[in-house]
Amino acid sequence: MSNSTVEHFTLRVKAKKGVNLLSTKSRSGQWLVSSELLTGGKHSTATVDVSRVDGAGPRDGDSSSEIMQLDFEMENFRSKSVTRRIMWHIDYRGRNPPPDLEKVVTELTVIQRDIRAIVPLAMDTEIINTAILTGRTVAIPVKVIAIELSGVIVDVSAMVECKSNNEDIIKVSSSCDYVFVSGKESRGSMSARVTFTYEHLSAPLEMTVWVPKLPLHIELSDARLSQVKGWRVPILPDRRSVRDSEHEEDEDERKQSRGCALQYQHSTLQVFTQFHTTAAEGTGQVVTMLGPDWLVEVTDLVSDFMRVDDPRVAHMVDSSTLAGREPGTTLFKVVSPLVEAVLGETLVTVAEEKVSITDLKAQVVSSLSLSLHPSPGNSHTIIARTSVQQTLSFFKQEALLSLWISYSDGTTAPLSLYDPKDYNLVVTSLDEKVVSVTQDRAFPLVVAESEGAGELLRAELVICESCQKTKRKSVLSTALATVRVHFGSEEDPTYDYDHVSSRPGLGEAGASTTLRAEVDRKADPSQDSRMSSASHPTEDFPTIPTGFVQVTRGLTDLEIGMYALLGVFCLAILVFLINCIVFVLKYRHKRIPPEGQTNMDHSHHWVFLGNGQPLRAHNDLSPQPESPGNPLENVQTCCHGDHHSSGSSQTSVQSQVHGRGDGSSGGSTRDQSEDPLNSPTSKRKRVKFTTFTTMPSDELAYNSIPIADEEDLEWVCQDMGLQDPEELHNYIRRIKEIA
């Protein structure tokens, strides 16, 4: 110090093992330095005695001055770096010594090489936070290397320390060997930073973190499901009961007892999202992966977290197929694996209306070809295009049939979407010399036998055997498939599959790429280049020049029965009309009898003669209205004599009278006003015709005709020839016994 008055002091140095003290020397002409060095087994010491030269005063203007130099060396070590300590103790003996002794410890880090910098390296500069969707940690390994002065690179990953600048975006492991996201992060960043430290050196690792955009976009090939007319499938028990069943026989009996029901339409489902991040800290600018027009398919990632809100309405056949169960409306959801939250949902409707199969299309697939080329609009994307080849080019080459079902509601679905146990697929070769068919699998194989071309295959979609109502197989639909067999090197025309939505109104789909074998990127349906649906519509096949011919499908048992019943009804109506025409013609040409002639030839037509007053006064008889010109009124009696009633004053007689040709009743009577009492004809017997509208009951069988005086009654019959009253009474008695 410039103002220091210290003239003499002693410096004692103690070094731990691994450091050897070598020598001391003076660095100033004003100070005399003398030292004593001792080396031990655990440490080495040095005692340095320093004194000012006589006559040398303190230097002005200098804040500090260098007095002495201590040389030491480090012993060899095997590790990449070591730390050694040297302790200093100063003893002042001047005229004004400090009150307290001072001790200083110097810590030295010694490394094998001269390292100039460290660099953290990650396997990728971007991390996609799919842990929000799956609940599984996404990690990227990290290595830290050190660069020496000579250019040598050394891995120092095991000796570094690390820390994340914002754990709400990205985290780092305690061993500093990987960075990760756990799904609990709330946002992303294009400059997420993790700092690594090695000794006195430090370096940051910057990464881009993408997070999914919520809610998720759920796409159904058909959001309105219906029953399919005529397609009956077995009613299987619940999956839980099938799993818990111990014996296969019990399971088979349960299946048989449940019977069959109509098949419900199936729908494919896809889940999409956008991954986005912020441009920089504090800016709030959102950046979307590949641009705002692109979506990423994450169906496989969230398949374990798909739920149907009401399983009675619809259920999931597998991770990508939805089927109806009963009419109603429900929600299809994707739930969070980490918290109680819904990541996305869509409405599913199961309609009461039934649909029918309108067409079945079949295409031979002999091989596939894949081509890759960059997207013209985006240099970061690659378009993969798959082409179908239909020609069988060598002997015994096998091919498959691609089958699609078209429904009356305009939707289309691949046959592979349905369980093979729910139908029978019968493929028949129309020319066994060209192609043969192997039927021992769910999807039959087509085998090339010789060269030829044409519609040589017929595919029939048939109801499964357990649901056949009759021995005659119920064919749902039939299709013809074109086959071309050419043994040679001629190039086969390829046909591209252009993905189109299965529902009217949606546009064409954009191309898709693969993102690190985890998710597929698809176009946003809100843009001109729209996202594809999983189910191809009927418009897909006409773009392929295969010459499809629509084949009339066979009639079902129900349709045959309805047509037969309709034919019987038509025949019955025709017979009825012919009968009516004949009846009308018959009565139109029938001769009308002349007035005044009445058929009185039947023995069961009784004529009651009397004054008419007792009948008209009695309530049990209902005579028809009188016809003024009735010629029967003047009919003379044919039987005369005394009348003996033999004690029976009540008789039950049912009289039937032929009607006149003019429609008037032949049994009507005149009113008494037309024949006064003092008229010369007042005592003449009148003919009374009575028709009983209802049969009398058993109790009143003999009380239906009123009692008349014997002098006023005469029973006559024109045809019976009963002149004797006794014979007439006997005849009436027999009628009463029969009644």
Image: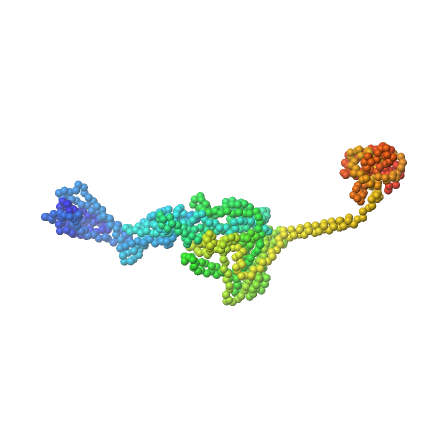
**Residue in the image at 34% along x and 50% along y:** 193
Q: Would residue 337 appear left or right of 414 to someone viewing this image?
A: left
Q: Which is more toward the observer, 706 or 490?
A: 706
Q: Would residue 408 appear left or right of 88 to someone viewing this image?
A: right
Q: Which is more toward the observer, 109 or 120?
A: 120
In the displayed orientation, state which residue is furthest to the left.
Answer: 55
Is residue 210 visible in this depiction of the protein? no
Q: Which is more toward the observer, 96 or 587?
A: 587
Image position, residue 191 (x, y; %): 35, 51
How many callouts does the rendering have?
0
Image position, residue 606 (x, y; %): 83, 39
**Residue in the image at 81% along x and 37% along y:** 670
Image position, residue 395 (x, y; %): 53, 65
**Colouring of the image:** rainbow
Is residue 465 visible in this depiction of the protein? yes
Image position, residue 313 (x, y; %): 53, 46
Quadrant including the C terminus = top right
**Residue in the image at 75% along x and 49% along y:** 584
Q: Would residue 39 appear left or right of 604 to someone viewing this image?
A: left
**Residue in the image at 35% along x and 48% along y:** 281
Q: Is residue 255 above or below residue 543?
A: above
Q: Which is more toward the observer, 624 or 552?
A: 624
